Amino acid sequence: MDKSSYFCSMLKLRFILRKEFLVLFRDLPGLIILFLMPVLLIFVVTLAQENALKSQNSKTQILFVHESMTPFSEKLFESLDSSGFFHPIDKINQLPVTFAEAKTLIGKGDFKFGVIITSIPEVVLLIDPTLQANYKNPVINSLNFIIKSTQAKEVMHDILSNLPANTRPVIQSMVAEKMQKLPPIKETYALREKSAIQPNVIQNNVPGFILFAMFFIVIPMAGSLITEKNEGSFQRLRSLPVPIAIILSGKVLAYLAVCLIQFLLMLTIGIWVFPTCFGLPQLQIGHQYLAIALATMASSMAAVGFGIIVGTAASTHNQAALFGSVMVVLLGVISGTFLPIHLMPEFIQYVSYLSPIRWGIDNYLNLFIREGNIVSIMPKTILLILFFGFAMITSIAIFARQK
C-alpha cells in the first residue's frame, strides 16, 4: 500500500469512527442503561453476598431445653455457648423453655433449631421444616460434632472418676500434657509469599462484573448494525469506495473504547466506592499492569466480536436484544459472575470452559488473587483473541452473503 492509499484509508476510518461515536452519544437512554445496569447488578450482588457472609459468621440462635437437668446438659449448654457459632437460649421471659414451647416456636419459624435433653435422657434436635438442605446440613453437622465431643468428655470424666485415688492425678496429668502438645490448627490461603492480596467478596466479584459489563455492549452494538442494515445506511456506505474491513474496524474501535470505560468504571467501584461508602475491603489489583492491560484488551475484543456476530446474524432489533441479553446473562451465570463456579453441578462447570466470559474472568482472578503474570494468562488470552478473529471472519462472511 502506497502512502496516499494509507492516508486515504486512515481518513475513511476516522470518519467511520466519528459516525460511530455520534450514534453512541445520540442514544443517551441506551448509554445510561449500558453503564447503569452492570453498576446496579454489582451493587446488589456484592452487598447481598456480603450480608450472607455476615449472617453465616454471626451466631445461630438455638433453643435449649433442659428436661433432664444433668451435668451433661449443663456442659453441653456451655459447649454450645463457647463454640463461637451458636447462641443457646434456655429461657424466654425469664421462664425455662419447654419441649412443647420449643416445638411451637420452631414450627412457626421464630427459631430455626432446638436442642432438647429429654428425661429419658436422650438428645433431640428440632429443625424448622422449611429450611433448605444447603443451610440445614452444615448446622446439624456442627451440632452433632459438639454433642459428640461433649459426650466423649463426659465418658472420659466418668472413667477418670472411677480410677483409684492414687492413680487419678497421674492419669489426669498425662491427659492434660498430651492435650497441650497437640499441634495448633492454622487457617491460611495458598498465596505467594509476602502477598498483600487477600481473597474476599470484592476480589472475586469485580472480575466477573467487568466481563459482564463488557459483553453487555451486545445490545447497543447489535442494534446499531441492524439499524444500518434496515435503514439502508450500510448499503450507502457500501456504495462508496469503503472496504467492509474499514466499516467493521470503526465499530470495533468505538466499542473497544466503551469496553475500556466499563473496565475503569468497575475498577473505580471496587477500589473507591465500596470501601468509602460501604466499608468493604478495597479491590487489590496487584502490580502486573501490562498483564492487566493485555487481559483487558483481549476481553474487550472478545466482547466486541460477540456484539458484531449477533448484530450481523440477527435481522430485527427484537431478535438481537432478546438473544444478546439472554446469552450474556446465561454465559455470566455459568462463568461465575453471580455464583462461584465450584457451587455449580459438574456438568455446568465443564460447559463453562467454552464461555469467553469465563476465559476473561479467569485471567482477572489469576492477576487479582493469584498474582499471576503475562505468561500465566496467555492461554486464555489467546482463546479470547481467537474468538474475536472467528467472530470477525464469520461476520464478514455473513455480510458478503447478505450483499
Image: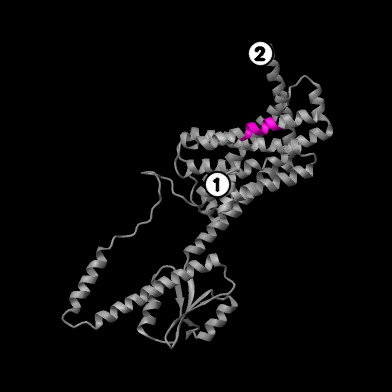
Q: Position of residue 261 (x, y in %)?
A: 61, 37
Residue drawn 36% across the image and 75% down it: 150
Q: Which residue is mark 2?
A: 1
Magenta range is 387-394
Q: Which residue is mark 1?
A: 206
The residue lying furthest to the right in this view is 231
The residue lying furthest to the left in this view is 166
Which amino acid type corresponds to the residue marked 2 in the rendered image?
Met
In the image, is residue 190 above or below residue 307? below
Query: Does the magenta-highlighted stretch encompass residue 182?
Result: no
Which amino acid type corresponds to the residue marked 1 in the rendered image?
Val
Q: Position of residue 278 (x, y in %)?
A: 54, 54
Circle 1 SS class:
helix
In the image, is residue 242 above or below residue 190? above
In the image, is residue 68 above or below residue 195? below
Circle 2 SS class:
loop
Q: Quadrant of residue 380?
A: top right
Q: Position of residue 72 (x, y in %)?
A: 36, 81
Tell which of 262 and 310 is nearer to you.
Answer: 310
